[in-house]
Image (tube, rainbow, N blue to C red):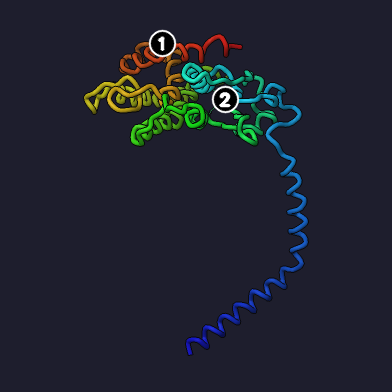
Amino acid sequence: MRRFIHLVSATLMYRTLQRSFQLTRHLRPQLQTRRLTILPQMASHSLYEDSTPAEVKNAKGLHLITMNTPNGQKVQIMLEELKEIYGTEWTKTMINIMTNEQKKDWFLRLDPNGRIPVLVDNTQDPPFPVMETSAELLYLLKFADKKDVFGFTDELERNEALQWLFFWHGSGAPYQGQVNHFAKFAKEKIPYAIERFKNETLRVFGVLEIRLSGKYTGEPRDYLAGKGKGKYSIADIGTWPWVKGWDFNFSKEDMEPFPHLLKWIDRIAERPAVQRGIGDEYKQ
Ligand SMILES: N[C@@H](CCC(=O)N[C@@H](CS)C(=O)NCC(=O)O)C(=O)O
């Protein structure tokens, strides 16, 4: 009896499928044509177009499109650090974001977000564009820092570096960026917005201070990630270019609660690669 019921329901299912196949027959040629018309267009798409600057299009190895802002400096510093250790080479294109070059089609092909910096690795086939500073640091760590000098081999330390890298990317840069915008660049000065983002940035500075002072661990540290006092890593490289610019919007009094953070700023500022990464080479 059960086999009979199975047989009947299988036959019914087959008939329903057959019927719906027949009913939708008229749509299939259309779908096919659509697929055929879309595919050649996709195939013609490439990373570069006619208006892409020649120095970007013709670059051979790593190529950085940047401007000397805190976000640009993160990747500039990482490349300068890698050069010191491995002799890493790259070329660069400096753009001026005030002219909205980063909103043009040639740029959006590389980074649909239309923001600097963008790293293109022309040694990959096809060339591989990387957007978002933390992803760029991680890309360079993976492909250019074979000895993990700026990262960690121990998985827990590695994860710590990610925690602090993400913390700054998600909870630091966006707030400090908004302070800059509302306090300095916005035509209309909105006290609520200025106050809110200033307070939030100071709160985030306080989080870094807790980490560096060892308030809850009893052990002050030199760098954000790693065992003991920590090791200079992509977590510091991703954070420092922003925090070092505190005096753009904050006073010495504002910074008094953060003595360990201020020492960390000075410690990293002494590195020659850091000085080069924010230095004359990148000034326009
Ligand atoms: N989340 C992005 C932020 C990049 C970003 O905001 N870059 C700024 C310069 S610091 C920019 O290109 N601004 C121009 C614009 O917004 O059009 C990243 O980390 O790469």
Name the residue: 65% across, 25% down. 60
Taking depth in this image into account, of 109 and 159 the one nearest to the observer is 159
Amino acid type indicated by mark 1: Glu
Residue 149 in percent (x, y) is at 41, 24
Residue 22 position in % (x across, y down): 72, 73
Disc 2 secondary structure class: loop
| Mark 2 close to ligand 1, CB under 8 Å | yes
Whether residue 182 is visible:
no
Q: Nearer the viewer, mark 1 or mark 2?
A: 1
**The disc labelled 2 sits on which kind of residue?**
Pro
Residue bearing the label numbered 2: 117
Badge 1 crowding class, 10 Å Cα cut-off, few under 14, some 14 to 19, many 20 or more, is few
Residue 61 point in image, percent of width and height? 61, 25
Residue at horizontal 30%, vertical 25%?
210
Marks 1 and 2 close (CB-CB < 8 Å): no
The structure residue drawn at horizontal position 45% and vertical position 25%, both measured from the top left corner, is 238
Compare residues 251 and 168 and report the one nearer the observer: 168
Q: Is residue 275 left or right of residue 225?
A: right
Quarter assignment of residue 108: top right
Q: Of the numbered discs in the image, which one, if any, rests on residue 270?
A: 1
Element type at mark 1: loop
User: Measured from the top left, where is residue 191 in percent x and y?
Assistant: 46, 22
Rounded to the nearest angstrom, the CA distance separating label 1 from label 2 is 24 Å
Furthest residue toward left: 218
* Residue 16: assigned label: none
Vertical placement of residue 270 versus 176, above or below? above
User: Dividing the image into four equal quarters, which quarter contains ligand 1?
Assistant: top right
